Amino acid sequence: MNQKEEILYISQKLTEFRLNYKILHWSFMNSKNLTEKQTNAILDEKARLEKLIEAFEKRLKELEK
């Protein structure tokens, strides 16, 4: 994979991760009567997405130098 293809792939994945993060955040903030298990699942997924977004943003910055 050349540099341009990698940048494009990372940009696409970042868009996907950010959208999923926003959907999870909105769902969490607007849901009522969530069980503890559901709440923990949402928070775990948010944390996972935050780490992925951070890693992909770091890699993208490295490639753009």
Image: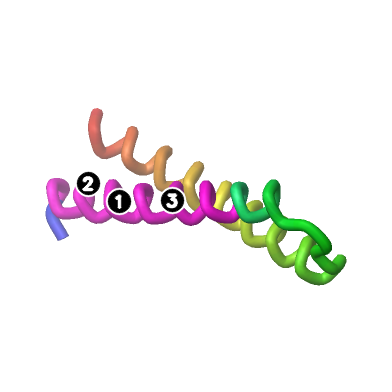
Query: On the image, numbered disc 1 is attached to which residue?
Result: 10
Q: Is residue 58 left or right of residue 44?
A: left
**Residue 57 position in % (x across, y down):** 41, 40
Name the quadrant containing residue 34: bottom right
Mark 3 falls on what kind of element?
helix
- Residue drawn 50% across the image and 52% down it: 52
> Could you say which is closer to the camera, residue 22 or residue 29?
29
Along the polypeptide, which appears first: circle 3 or circle 2? 2
Task: Examine the structure image and report whether residue 11 is included in the region drawn in magenta.
Answer: yes
Display colour scheme:
rainbow
> Could you say which is closer to the camera, residue 36 or residue 4?
36
**Residue 58 position in % (x across, y down):** 42, 38
> Could you say which is closer to the camera, residue 64 or residue 8?
8
Quadrant location of the C terminus in the rendered image = top left
- Seen from this angle, which residue lies furthest right? 36
Query: On the image, numbered disc 2 is attached to which residue?
Result: 7
Mark number, residue 28? none
- Residue drawn 65% across the image and 52% down it: 47
Q: Which residues are magenta?
A: 3-24
- Residue drawn 32% across the image and 40% down it: 60
Gap in angstroms between the C-alphas marked 3 and 2: 18 Å
Three-letter code for the amino acid on which mark 1 is drawn: Ile
Three-letter code for the amino acid on which mark 3 is drawn: Leu
Mark number, residue 19? 3
- Residue drawn 15% across the image and 54% down it: 5
| C-beta proximity under 8 Å, tags 2 and 1 | yes
Gap in angstroms between the C-alphas marked 2 and 1: 5 Å
Three-letter code for the amino acid on which mark 2 is drawn: Ile
Mark toward the viewer: 3 or 2: 3
Gap in angstroms between the C-alphas marked 3 and 1: 14 Å
